[in-house]
Amino acid sequence: MRALLTVTAALAALHAGQAVAQDAVAQTPVAAPAAEAEDVLTWDELPADLRRRAEPLIGRVAAQAVLNVQGAVEADADFRSIDHGHVLFEQAVRPAALARITRSVDNAAKYGPVGAALWPGIGPAGDYWCWRRFNPENAFSRGNIYCYEDKDGDGTSERMMENPAWMAQLPASRFQFLSLGHDEGVEENATFQVEPGTLGEFNEIVVLRYYGATRGLLQPDGSLAPATVEFELLTGPDRQSLGEVSRIRVQLNAAGKGEYHALNGVRLEVDGVNVDGTARVKLLGGLPEGRTLLIPPLTRELIVERMSEVFNPDGSPKEQPPASEDEATPAPAAAPAA
Amino acid sequence: MIFRFGIGLLLGACMFAGGAAAQTASRPSTPFVIHGVAVDSTERTAREGQPLLAQPVTSVRSARLDAEAPAESAGWFKDKSFAAGTPMFGAYAGDQWSYCAVAESRQSFWTTDQFICYVDADDDGRFDSAIDSGTPFNGVPLLVFSTGASRPLPAPVPYSRLPLADGPSVEYAISYEIVRPHGRAMLNGRNVPRAATHIVPVVGFRVEGGRIQPLSAAGGERRIPLAGGQQATIRVKGAVIEILGVNNDDSVRYRVVETIPSHVDQIMLQIITTTTWVVY
């Protein structure tokens, strides 16, 4: 049930235009299926209500900056022992392209003057070119992100979105975002010129960090099985200033083993986890080198695969271990602040 | 530009004048272990609000001070140091483990207990800094919400890791509430409460005074029908408790069939802050 809720929450978040991207959103090239082939349902075997809700989400792109990954990760040949906070990979990223404003809109100081460098963004409605004002005197002073919508790719904007700095979901990042914000209502159209073969100005990193075991049945030898282990996909300018893009949850079976693969290229294999969170993990893949998205659009195959972990062929929910029940939240503590 | 900013602030204040804005902050707890206990299936009686079943909970990591550690930042009327041997529970936030002890208030009517969490940044078996981590979340001395600034200790303090079951523990408990219609009825010539219809499990951590701090969606809050107004089976996180009878004072006769198996779990901690804007 918990897995169902997780995936459903991710689907709902994506539907709402948010790139919350839990494990259902950040997925991988279709390499090795996580579940045994005979356990994977077909699309038609999924509950009708779920199919109806999932259908509009397939192929929908979450709002984000388009990245260029500077180098591929090296896959592990053997399992490595890891502890909480262990970084499995760090990949350098830059904006995947660069364009400059050739005709600005009114209030150019706010929205971007002629010559300002833009970086590419993407969202459910199409492609964008984004800009942000920085104060060169103060590295912490940064403005809202303004993204010019250019659906037809003709170099002229049709709409401008404002993502306010105070609502930033990746506050440490200089150019990455998980929401386009709202229509700023600017009536003029800006024009911009792409500089072919040029990457954006910013240098940041994407990190996969081990969080630990968050659920699991304790076995006599001190291991957990079945269990859930979690990883954090993070990004930001450096390791001290990272924001969470998505939380990756790997379900371990009764033997304590599990696999995970995401559409963004992250692939993991877990060979067991102990009660204190130490685990044996093999990194099989990271972000592919070159132009990529941290949160690729959802695919039908992925929904079927994830839902196969939750439903039986007759549509009934699969039984979950007692340690995998729904999340518990203490009654909220109200604290007057002012 | 300054003028525009000033107007923006003023408009913002006017818009919220007299209103209240609620902000929610949440973060996951450090994973913890609910330890299994032996099943004792003898029939017992409990009153409403008392635990039908209680099991110890520890952090997945615990430690013990091997020397006295300062706790000056705890403030007035609180412990100013922790003695060697003090057990501490592990708290994980960001990418860092810390080990926390509770500086108890000696004037509990005035001040509250406070966490001091120690960090071993270089992993050499000695704490090198301390964090003032606020009060126990919802009164549970295992749940840390705040992570304040880290201050270096005057001198490193050695510590040792503790076996899982030896760490500081709290209790995870299952209690209940009885649901019955309002009003009273006559039974065998006596005026008694009307028959109970449902029992509602209450699941959570026991805090000071034996009260249970309920957790939402932990398997409680479901109304379970009472057969004949008397009998039901409560199933929470693998525990099975048979309710054998409900008395007029809402106490129950029950027996535990299965206890919660040893497992690791995690909850979301959530604080709703209400900001009230007042314009004079």
Image: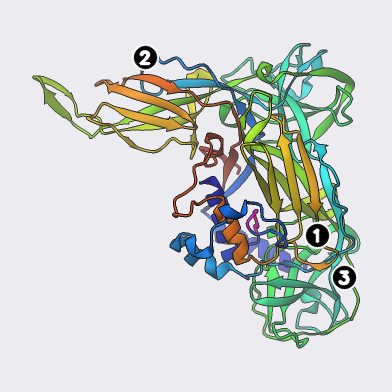
The residue at which mark 2 appears reads as: B44
Q: Name which residue lies at 49% across and 51% down.
A: A312
Q: Is residue A283 magenta?
A: no
Label 1's element? loop
Q: Amino acid at mark 1?
A: Leu
Image height of B174 relative to A104, above or below: above
Q: CA distance from mark 2 to mark 1?
A: 58 Å
Instruction: Quadrant for residue B99, please give it.
Output: top right
In the rendered structure, which segment of residues is drawn in magenta? Answer: A20-24
The chain letter under disc 1 is A
Instruction: Quadrant for residue B199, please give it.
Output: top left
The chain letter under disc 2 is B
The residue at which mark 1 appears reads as: A287
Q: Amino acid at mark 3?
A: Gly
Q: Position of residue B182 (x, y in %)?
A: 22, 34
Q: Position of residue B25 (x, y in %)?
A: 62, 45
The residue at which mark 3 appears reads as: A200
Label 2's element? strand
- The nearer-to-camera label among 2 and 1 is 1
Q: Is residue B10 left or right of residue B43?
A: right
Image height of A180 relative to B198, above or below: below
Q: Main secondary structure of the magenta part?
A: loop
Q: Name which residue lies at 67% across and 55% down.
A: A33
Q: Is residue B14 left or right of residue B186?
A: right
Q: Position of residue B56 (x, y in %)?
A: 57, 20
In the image, A245 versus B82, the foreground residue is A245
Question: Taking the image as drawn, is residue B45 in sight?
Answer: yes
Question: Taking the image as drawn, is residue A13 in sight?
Answer: no
Image height of A280 relative to A136, above or below: above
Q: Amino acid at mark 2?
A: Arg
